[in-house]
Image: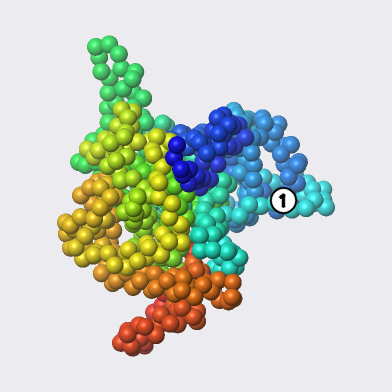
Amino acid sequence: PRSFSRHLSCPGTIAASVGSEEQPSAVAETGIEDKTLQKKFSEVQKERREQAQRTVLIHCPNNINEKKFLKYLSQHGPVNNHFFYESFGLFAVVEFCQKDSINSLQNGTHTPTQSTEAAIPFKSRFLNLRLKNPSSQVSAQPFVRTTNQSPPSSKKLFELLSYAESIEEQLNTLLQAFQLTEENVRLRHLTCSLIEDIAAAYFPSCVIRPFGSSVNTFGKLGCDLDMFLDLDETGKLDVHKNTGNFLMEFKVKNVPSERIATQKILSVIGECLDNFGPGCVGVQKILNARCPLVRFSHQASGFQCDLTANNSIALKSSELLYIYGSLDSRVRALVFSVRCWARAHSLTSSIPGAWITNFSLTVMVIFFLQRRSPPILPTLDSLKSIADAEDRCILEGNNCTFIQDVNKIQPSGNTETLELLIKEFFEYFGNFAFNKNSINIRQGREQNKPDSSPLYIQNPFETSLNISKNVSQNQLQKFVELARDSAWILEQEDKNQPFSSSRQPWGLAALLLPPGSGHTSLSRQKKKKPMSEKVKGLLASIKSNSPDRSTDTSGK
Ligand code: CTP
Ligand code: MG
């Protein structure tokens, strides 16, 4: 028998669905707690999509009576789940047990008529509830309890971190505070489902699939919602139906390239969203990008959405990250802290540019964990070598095969603490030979850089691509310096054991402080910096009147 147990992890709230009301959890089924079965990514996505299709979004009056509201809705069928949240007003997410209930609800719903403006009568699952007789409804009822959809403020985070008793606990606290909640995950899938209804006006069997941090277990509250229009489902359905000697094809319009086809489709969907998508505002078509997209904000949910098309490789890489995030609880704790650290020091930004991205940082953490001895995470090649026939996956000519069932992967025997790992992470990348080596999670070892990009991180599936091609030498340099400083801060704390003795931010909190905020470690660190750099900084601030990005410590 192994002397260690798997570091059990709950990958975001996605795994939480395993234990939700209607589905018995794996724990309940087996009765063995440390053998909790993790669901496959595709199963989770399918369940979430189906759940979203039984769900409506309702804009409610602030003084709504929850009991009466639920009673009113249950005329259309039993309600499985509901929650309220505040955005620009009060909203309710209501999940029925059956899809039919939605038709029933919509049948009794009308399009409003206004005297000054005209309504575009698009009937969606985004509804507005009005009180027929407001005065009689405003009873002594307490206001409904709302769920929070935003990340904690910096102040709140520092407070939470100060209560922790070890760096290990701080990393886990940060994870708990920032990870997507069950409600937020539901709202993300619902938003995709609502957009799907709009796209389905043109492509009836299309699917809008969320990908990226919304589903890969590394999403932070407030992160954007990446989604893509999947039209493949249409083709797949037809293949099975062909019998006999004839082959029937759809007569279609042809265009010179896949890219042009994507641009045309996204352009039309973008118009639809702009013209009659309820709550879709600020629609921008960014069709000349390497990966054409439509960016918009979904006002009711508060999500900034990026819609692309035919992006199945990105979905596969989300699945790979989901596997890595589910394998060992230390992975997500480390990734969340590194992402927050990078954001606090303006290494990442919500504006596209020469900055390092969260996706790159995540891959760097995975690579680092593959390099531990014994490794905490397996290489992508080894995940491919244990794949079954059903895992086989070729996308656009790229072999994207890897084992899809997390339960079949041997847990790591490595028992290093998060405190050690975060320190070693900063040490490792503070001294990495970025000038000659690339980062490669497929093989789990560094390789010679194939070109002169400052930071080269091989795309795990499209192996000729560098996922951090955009990163400038300056940004990389800044990353390296901050990593070294952070390793140094943690080392000092180790020596001084300052935890309980001082009210100063310590451990992870000290790493998240903006430069120059007066922390003892940081001021010591400042002394160490060469004078010329201070002078350079002063000169730069005199020369430029533009706002200094480095003062922005708010989370994305
Ligand atoms: N992606 C990629 N190559 C890149 C950038 C992105 O393959 N150079 C894919 C990844 O699968 C990534 C997804 O596109 O997860 C979404 O990209 P992005 O929104 O930039 O990253 P997220 O992982 O969603 O992280 P964030 O929370 O910052 O949005
Ligand atoms: Mg994203």
Mark 1 Cα-neighbour bin, 10 Å: few <14, some 14–19, many ≥20: some
Give residue 515's position: percent from left, percent from top. Answer: 44, 77
The colour style of the image is rainbow
Q: Which residue is mark 1?
A: 144
Image point (75%, 46%), residue name: 65
Give residue 535's position: percent from left, percent from top. Answer: 33, 88
Judged left or right of residue 47, residue 24 is: right
* Secondary structure beneath label 1: loop
- The N terminus is located in which quarter? top left
Q: Is mark 1 within 8 Å of ligand 1?
A: no
- Judging depth in this view, the residue of 358 and 99 nearest the camera is 358
Judged left or right of residue 144, residue 447 is: left
Give residue 509's position: percent from left, percent from top. Answer: 51, 69
- Judging depth in this view, the residue of 34 and 505 nearest the camera is 34
Image point (63%, 52%), residue name: 147
* Total count of labels: 1
Give residue 118's position: percent from left, percent from top. Answer: 56, 48
Image point (52%, 39%), residue name: 34
Quarter residue 78 falls in: top right
Residue 540 in view of the camera: no
Q: Is residue 291 above or below residue 2?
A: below
Residue type at mark 1: give it: Val
